[in-house]
């Protein structure tokens, strides 16, 4: 004996999968992403004691008006600052979580 049933909504599932594939394609390769897009105010409030990435950078005590300035901050100092002011063990951990959440947002998932 063979029973069957009708499944509805598969067109919506296919559209969602197509949308995800398109969004994922846009994320392929290397991209320059602004700190403000990675470290949104929502991210900063959730994981740190500061409201914005600008406040975070200023609070390090180092001059960081440019990417070169930020890159010149000693990683040991940045790691210590991250440990003291956030839920992360170091800068790499914080950056990784920010990239993870950015990617999820770009794919259309809530974080």
Image: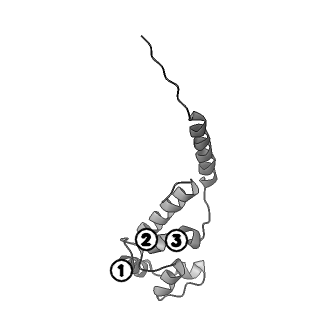
The residue that mark 1 highlights is: 84
Q: Position of residue 63 (x, y in %)?
A: 54, 88
Q: Residue at x 46, y 86 (%)?
A: 59
The residue that mark 2 highlights is: 46
Task: Work out which residue is located at the far top of the displayed protein and give it.
Answer: 1
**Mark 1 / mark 2, whichever is N-terminal:** 2
Label 1 residue SS: helix
**Label 3 neighbour load within 10 Å: few <14, some 14-19, many 20+:** many
Q: Which of the two discs, 3 and 2, sits closer to the camera?
A: 2
Tell me, yes or no, if residue 91 can be seen here. no
Q: Residue at x 55, y 58 (%)?
A: 105
**Label 2 neighbour load within 10 Å: few <14, some 14-19, many 20+:** few
Q: Position of residue 75 (x, y in %)?
A: 44, 77
Would you say 44 lies left or right of 64 here?
left
Pick the front one: 89 or 3:
3
Asked if 75 appears above or below 63 in the picture, the reply is: above
Label 3 residue SS: loop
Mark 3 → mark 2, Cα distance in angstroms:
10 Å
Mark 1 → mark 2, Cα distance in angstroms:
15 Å
Q: Residue at x 52, y 77 (%)?
A: 53
């Amino acid at each position: 004996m063979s029973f069957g049933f009708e499944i509805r909504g598969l067109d919506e599932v296919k559209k969602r999968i197509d949308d995800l594939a398109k969004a994922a394609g846009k994320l392929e390769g290397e991209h320059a992403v602004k700190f403000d897009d990675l470290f949104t105010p929502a991210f900063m409030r959730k994981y740190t004691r500061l409201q914005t990435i600008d406040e975070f950078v200023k609070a390090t005590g180092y001059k960081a008006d440019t990417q070169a300035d930020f890159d010149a901050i000693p990683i040991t100092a940045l790691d210590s600052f991250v440990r003291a002011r956030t839920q992360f063990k170091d800068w790499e951990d914080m950056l990784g979580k920010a990239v993870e959440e950015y990617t999820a947002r770009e794919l259309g998932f809530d974080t």
